[in-house]
């Protein structure tokens, strides 16, 4: 008893652009390539995080000469993306090497919010919530401040690319029942 077979040919089901059809590795997307840095531009942020809040539809006038629907109103499905405010919590400086970019230093902010520190724990409720407490204590001392200034001077002198570490403000999102912030570079 062999498996049943299709009797006739048929067009394929679904677009090959969505292959492989499997669960994504991470819930949050990642930036696969940053736009090239231009020397004559002022430093600016090139990406931000957005969360899908839902879908709706819009009524618009189609502009497609030659189409039957040209100059007619059509209904299109649209996705609503909510982008919460982001807070900058650190800097990463990169040196250009023959094998690509190499991180020189990472400098964190003196104070990190609770939503950001939740990211460093699997279970926040059961943890002792000690992340970055020793770092904050060290940076508040005179030696810590001097060390931070020294690192910043090194970043300014040697680094060809400087990127910021930013996290989303999860308290501003209504539809996402999550308190743990997403951190991205």
Image (spheres, grey):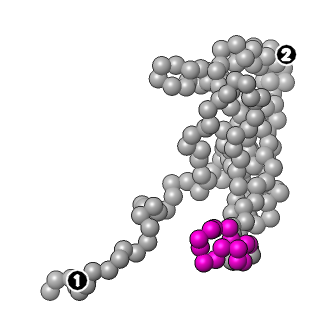
Question: Percent from the top left, x then y, of residue 18?
Answer: 47, 63
Part of the protein shown in magenta: 60-73
Is residue 177 shown above or below 106?
Answer: below
Q: CA distance from mark 1 to mark 2?
A: 77 Å
Left or right of 26: which side holds 2?
Answer: left
Q: Where does label 2 land, which residue?
A: 142
Q: Is residue 182 visible?
A: yes
Q: Is residue 143 visible?
A: no
Question: Percent from the top left, x then y, of residue 142?
Answer: 85, 16
Quadrant of the drawing holding the C terminus: top right
Q: Main secondary structure of the magenta part?
A: loop
Depth order, front residue of 11/131: 11
**How many numbered marks appear?**
2
Is residue 130 shown above or below 52?
Answer: above
Q: Secondary structure at mark 2?
A: helix
Depth order, front residue of 124/103: 103
Farthest-out residue, front? 66
Could you tell which of marks 1 and 2 lies nearer the N-terminus?
Answer: 1
Is residue 148 shown above or below 26?
Answer: above
Depth order, front residue of 139/160: 160
Q: Residue 184 bears which disc, if any?
A: none
Question: Percent from the top left, x then y, of residue 163?
Answer: 68, 31
Left or right of 147: which side holds 30?
Answer: left
Q: Quadrant of residue 95?
A: top right
Q: Where does label 1 land, which residue?
A: 5
- What residue lies at 70% left-to-right and 59% top-to-bottom? 51
Is label 1 or label 2 in front? 1
Q: Quadrant of residue 178?
A: bottom right
């Amino acid at each position: 008893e062999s498996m049943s077979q299709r009797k006739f040919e048929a067009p394929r089901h679904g677009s090959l652009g969505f292959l492989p059809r499997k669960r994504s590795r991470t819930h949050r997307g990642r930036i696969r390539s940053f736009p090239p840095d231009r020397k004559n531009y002022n430093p600016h942020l090139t990406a931000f995080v957005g969360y899908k809040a839902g879908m709706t539809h819009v009524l618009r006038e189609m502009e497609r000469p030659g189409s039957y629907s040209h100059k007619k109103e059509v209904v299109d499905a649209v996705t609503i993306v909510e982008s919460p405010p982001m807070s900058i919590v650190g800097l990463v400086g990169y040196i250009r090497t023959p094998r690509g970019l190499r991180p020189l230093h990472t400098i964190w902010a003196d104070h990190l919010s609770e939503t950001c520190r939740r990211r460093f724990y699997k279970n926040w409720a059961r943890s002792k919530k000690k992340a970055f407490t020793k770092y904050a204590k060290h940076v508040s001392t005179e030696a810590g401040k001097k060390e931070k200034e020294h690192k910043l001077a090194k970043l300014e002198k040697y680094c060809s690319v400087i990127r910021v570490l930013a996290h989303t403000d999860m308290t501003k999102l209504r539809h996402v029942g999550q308190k743990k912030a997403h951190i991205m570079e």
